Amino acid sequence: MNENKINDILKRVLRVSTEDLKKDLGINDVENWDSLTHMTLIVDIENELNIELTGDEIAEMTSFSRIREILNSKI
């Protein structure tokens, strides 16, 4: 999976810095990562990476590392 593309999506949707992407931040660590932002993140990931996520995968995407793990498993 294209790590740069994933990082671009995370930065844009969650409004985090490049420095923050180096940390394993989770849903409770990012101030504006609420349920609406989470769904925006999912829609952008699916559209931009041309993949389809399951409900379980979406529910598990609660940290940067878990998002990367799930997306890397899709290729």
Image (cartoon, helix red, strand yellow):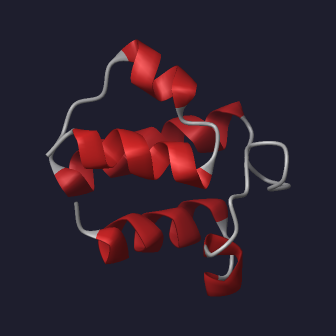
Above-or-below relation of 56 to 72: above
**Residue at screen point 41% across, 15% down:** 55
> Count the marks: how many?
0
For residue 48, side relative to residue 25 (left or right): left
Q: Position of residue 33 (x, y in %)?
A: 73, 47
For residue 46, side relative to residue 32 (left or right): left
Above-or-below relation of 61 to 54: below
**Residue 14 or residue 24, whichever sits in front:** 24
Dividing the picture into quadrants, the one containing residue 49 is bottom left
**Residue at screen point 22% across, 60% down:** 1
- Residue farthest to the top, as pictured: 55
**Residue at screen point 73% across, 57% down:** 25
Q: Position of residue 60 (x, y in %)?
A: 54, 26
Q: Position of residue 4 (x, y in %)?
A: 34, 77
**Residue at screen point 52% across, 43% down:** 66
**Residue 44 or residue 51, whichever sits in front:** 51
Dividing the picture into quadrants, the one containing residue 19 is bottom right
Dividing the picture into quadrants, the one containing residue 13 is bottom right
**Residue 6 or residue 31, whichever sits in front:** 6
Above-or-below relation of 23 to 43: below
For residue 74, side relative to residue 27 (left or right): left
Above-or-below relation of 61 to 8: above
Q: Position of residue 46 (x, y in %)?
A: 27, 43
